[in-house]
Amino acid sequence: MFWNKTEVNILKEIDTTDTWWCSSAVLFTVKNGRNTISEKFGPFDKDYECYGHLQLNGMPLIQGKFPECSTCKAMLATGYGIENIGCPELVEARDCMNSGFVSITDSAERIKPLLGLLCDGYYALADTICFPSDGGGNFFYEVPDELKYYDAACYGYYCSWDYNLIDHFPMFLYPTQSSSLINDERVEYYKEILQSDAEPPRALAYHYHGFMNTLLDGHHKACAAASLGKHVKCLTIIPCDGYLFDRNTLKRGTNLKEVNPVVETLAFAGLETEAENDLRYLDVHKELKGRPEITYQKFDLIGKKIHYGPSTYPTVRDIATLVDAENKYKGILPGFDPDCISRLVDEDTHDADRYLEAILHWLSSTDKEAAYKLSRSIVKKGVGRMRRDRMCAALKFLLTVRCEETEQLFADLYIALDNNKEYDEIIKIVDSYWKTT
């Protein structure tokens, strides 16, 4: 029947000028959606936690146990295996993604059949950069099939001693495809493409919880990016998760349902855009009408142990720390402006220590040459004014680099330290250079 026809409307592009993790995005709506890609949550228990799923055709792609507290981390577990769930719209979207990236609007138009599987509402489709990691420093396939707490599965992260809260945005990946389907030939194929194409084909993800994305397609692309020490570029579906009103028109204690105020701004996990004319609260507010019984079931998705890329990745703590740094020193993200880095190296503060340590964690997995230059600079500056945290981070990276210049740096530092007990932690790292040679 005509009036039940699914409609996906691309409304406009979202301004991403000041969003370092997203190069472009579009706002779209789904009307009469088929609800076959949907989030389901069960009732809260006595500990104020509930089970939840991201489902495709009624089967869980990812499972979780979620606290009511937005800054508390959630538990996640693998799902049924997306390869076991028939979905022609996903196959069609995969073909579109693999044909190359032209623009975000073009991509949204071409995958409309898949977007029509969503529930009714407002969404963003964003061209994002994501780490092929779980947010805890591990490769994204190194997850257990059982429920496990993830630091990145929270909606706000306290990154510093002064309780500075960093709001969530899509950054890390969680797999939905069995690890046994990953093959080296396909990974090598995508490695060649990633190295040669300025606009490589994207992976496809759904922003599910906090800083985590559920990977719908592109597991081989993510493995290839990891093996090259790069981010993976993802087209990420982000449901609307916030909205703002003109507070001058509302009084404290106003019943929003009764007033149904005009919505001025829509928010999508770090992206914001002006709402269309006369959009009302009840148009965007989704109230759960009862909570179905959702349970956890163990699936064997990670049977084959695989690993590509560096031994460790930036963590959600590193990312949150760098966002904190970007808020204070414009130019940190995403390219690490050399002048900003030099200022941090010259600055003797606890904040500068934290920022430099986080930058090193990022660079050690994505740009080893830049990590080496920064580590060398920190150590040379450090002689005579030992900043313990940044020195330890720099020296631990330099332990992985064997050359005459590195050996000379360790030798000069050993002499400067002169067994000073105040610097025991640094001395242990310096001593280990020769023990592991």
Image (cartoon, rainbow, N blue to C red):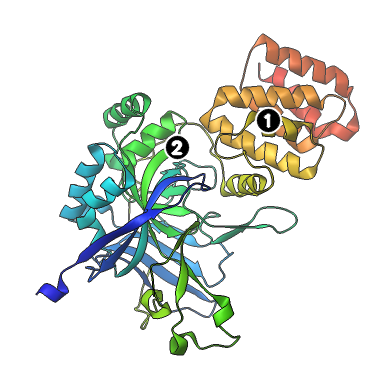
Residue 102 visible here: yes
How many C-alpha atoms fall within 10 Å of the one at disc 2: few (<14), some, or many (≥20)?
many
Q: Toward the viewer: 281 or 62?
A: 281
Instruction: Give the residue displayed 38% in from the left and 71% down from the top.
Output: 277
Residue where numbered disc 1 is placed:
339
Nearer the observer, 330 or 276: 276
Image quarter of the C terminus: top right
Q: In the rendering, at what x and y percent does residue 391 appear?
A: 75, 31
Q: Residues within 10 Å of mark 1 (few under 14, many from 20)?
A: few
* Residue that carries the numbered disc 2 in the rendered image: 231
Which residue lies most toward the top here?
404
Horizontally, residue 314 falls left or right of residue 221, namely right
In the picture, measured across the screen, residue 246 lies left or right of residue 236, that is right
93 versus 366 height, above or below: below
Instruction: Select label 2 or label 1 by which is in front.
Output: 1
> Outermost residue toward the front?
277
Quadrant of residue 257 within the rendered picture:
bottom left
Spatial distance from mark 2 to mark 1, Cα to Cα? 24 Å
- Tell which of 409 and 305 is nearer to you: 409
Position of residue 80 measured from the top left corner of the image (x, y, whole percent): 29, 57
Image quadrant containing the N terminus: bottom left
Q: For numbered disc 2, what is the local secondary structure? A: loop
At a point 55% along the width and 38% down the height, the residue shown is 334
Q: Position of residue 421 (x, y in %)?
A: 89, 32
Q: Secondary structure at mark 1?
A: helix
The kind of residue tagged 2 is: His
Name the N-terminal-most of marks 2 and 1. Answer: 2
Label at residue 322: none
